[in-house]
Image (cartoon, rainbow, N blue to C red):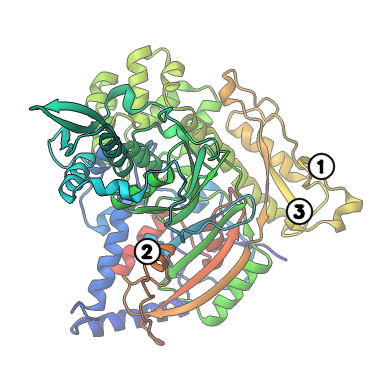
Amino acid sequence: MEAVEMNSPSLKRPLSEDDVATADEIKRQKTSEKSKTGNDSGQSIETVTEQADKSLLEDMKNEIIPHEENEEQEDEELEGSDEDGDPESFADMMKHGLTESDVGITKFVSSHKGFSGILKERYSDFVVHEIGKDGRVSHLDDFSVPVDDEDPSEETFAVLSDEDKQRLEELQLLKNKETSVAIEVIEDTKEKRTVIHQAVKSLFPGLETKTEDRDGKKCIVAYHAAGKKALANPRKHSWPKSRGSYCHFVLYKENKDTMDAINVLSKFLRVKPNIFSYMGTKDKRAITVQEIAVLRITAQRLAHLNKCLMNFKLGNFSYKNHPLKLGELQGNHFTVVLRNITGTDEQIEQAMHSLREIGFINYYGMQRFGTTAVPTYQIGRSILQNNWNEVMDLILKPRPGAEKGYLVKCREEWAKTKDPAAALKKLPVKRCVEGQLLRGLLKYGMKNIISAFGIIPRNNRLMYIHSYQSYVWNNMVSKRIEEYGLRAVPGDLTLKGATAVHIEEEDVDKYTIHDVVMPLPGFDVIYPKHKIGEAYKEMLVADNLDINNMRHKIRDYSLSGAYRKIIIRPQNVNWEVVAYDDPRIPLFTTDLDKLEGKPLPALPTDGKFRALKMEFSLPPSTYATMAIREVLKMDTSIKNQTQLNTTWLR
């Protein structure tokens, strides 16, 4: 097998004559449709496409918030209000973003001719189902709640009138200025009061209750728990010994990342986020289905959240004695739609057969490196170099490209004054990395940048150095494939259990490219015994780093290294080409669609556009976008996809 080099470092794979012909045909179709009404809405196909693509670009704009932590909902609303402008101006801004070749992604393994297609034109075109450690794929297919003797009966909730329920829901969702709701107890008895207390707390998670005398009448007063009490660990009231301490459930979410979803759940339940556990985080711009566990919160309380939460659903409840642990999953199953494809049936068959039989290069995807003119790996390199002034400068200095307006003002103020307090005043969102670093500089002073940087959460700090490791790995793998192709050679590395060993000359025929691993640089790894081993050293020397001394004086930033397979062969690969006319319609049914009985819209046999619907399973820490890149032979960066969508608007 021979490796294939990326055709061009340009943003988009150069169009072939076939592509141009197809594009011209699409333009003619759009022109001919312009004077007609399209579908039932009375819009032209061009207008429909334009709306869909503008929607994509708006979503992309809202996602480009570099270095930002998960924010509260108020901050999300604030962030979404910036960055006006048409798609063309946004695409111009994205000219400063990264392309694949900037981070070492340059090779392909297949020999088929590439074709174009749009990835994530709608977030619902990208669906992820988690695969648990037992190999079971997570699905949301059951809203029922397991009931035991300790749970309040359904009859309990009948003690609340419809008017009471409406007022309590408005209080729970903070929809009015009321700070409490009083429910008069008719036929007052202790048993009756207990039932009302139970009903309020079960139906409206987050509300606390107390009994008060008002005008000589007994009332149950519901109110929001406040302060430390609100975020206390789950109440230590009696939890049945026969019931597992953890409620496991399936979380179905749309266009939200995992931590955002958990933050919202914890706010509604009035508990700390750290009582939730999960096996892995999932993409934001997608529909994802994964298992979550929460300590001592009943399935009833969780199920009632389905009535008041947007963009996610909870189901498949069960009680178990253990939480979930990061990394316990076997992988993820992906269902992906690539819209407006230009490839012939033969090209598509060749591409998908190659993906199934050979696989793709296991590059770290573009998400690993950020979306702005200052890639995260540059900051990571400066940390490893102990160049703390440069770390501060890279995070805070003005940068070209797509950024939120308040970040631009903050950076301008910093460049002008180097005054942390003045720059911080320009930031309405204080929990972004820039705000955290400025707070640290304010607290520790400009001469103690290390301590100031330490205020940033540990995971965010480590993200930078892991990004640098990934940058080195991508570049080295491209060199390895260029030098030796798609076969195992003497001096390569393979794993025996968890230990890496060199492949010797006499054993080389026992191995294939699928057995070969490459190291992420660190103090606890070995390197290939051929030219690529030297290439690692040369790359780190060029970055003023010593490959033989990857221990850092700050322990957190010492890199032990790891091994990663260079080729991944997806499992359960299936595909189908479908025709469609309306870019807004879904092309497959989700778990939620099935639960709600929504049928798939009728699709034409010969539509104006074609889409490739593909399914495959991948192990953890691999990037579906890199599998899709291998199929299309196209740059998957936001920079390129933005330009592709903008071109489609013209």
Seen from the viewer's position, the closer of residues 443 and 174 is: 174
Residue 197 placement, left or right of 440? left
- Disc 1 is placed on an element classified as strand
Q: Residue 235, relative to residue 1: is it above or below?
A: above
Q: Quadrant of residue 269?
A: top left
Which residue is the site of mark 3? 515
Identify the residue at horizontal 52%, vertical 63% (top origin).
628
Name the side, left or right, on which 495 lies relative to 322: right
Residue located 47% across and 34% down the image:
239
Report which residue position mark 1 lands on. Answer: 501
Question: Tag 1 or tag 3, which sits nearer the N-term?
Answer: 1
For residue 168, which numbered disc appears in the image? none
Q: Quadrant of the N terminus?
A: bottom right
Q: Could you tell me which secondary element the residue under label 3 belongs to?
A: helix
Hey, which residue is sitting farthest right in the picture?
A: 506
Local crowd size for mark 2, using a 10 Å CA cut-off: few (<14), some (14–19), many (≥20): many
* Closer-to-camera residue (635/231): 231
> Which class describes the residues within 10 Å of circle 1: few (<14), some (14-19), or many (20+)?
some
For marks 2 and 3, give the CA distance.
35 Å
Tell me what residue is drawn at x 33 percent, y 22 percent. 228
Q: Is residue 528 left or right of residue 84?
A: right
Residue at the left extreme of this rendering:
215
Asked whether residue 527 appears in the rendered view, the answer is yes
User: Which residue type does callout 1 highlight?
Assistant: Val
> Of helix, strand and loop, which one carries label 2?
loop
In the rendered view, tell whether residue 110 sits above or below residue 216. below
Looking at the image, the residue that sits furthest to the bottom is 606
Q: Earlier in the sequence, mark 1 or mark 2?
A: 2
Residue identified by numbered label 2: 121
Residue at the image point whose x is 30% and y is 64% from the top: 53
Q: Amino acid at mark 3?
A: Asp
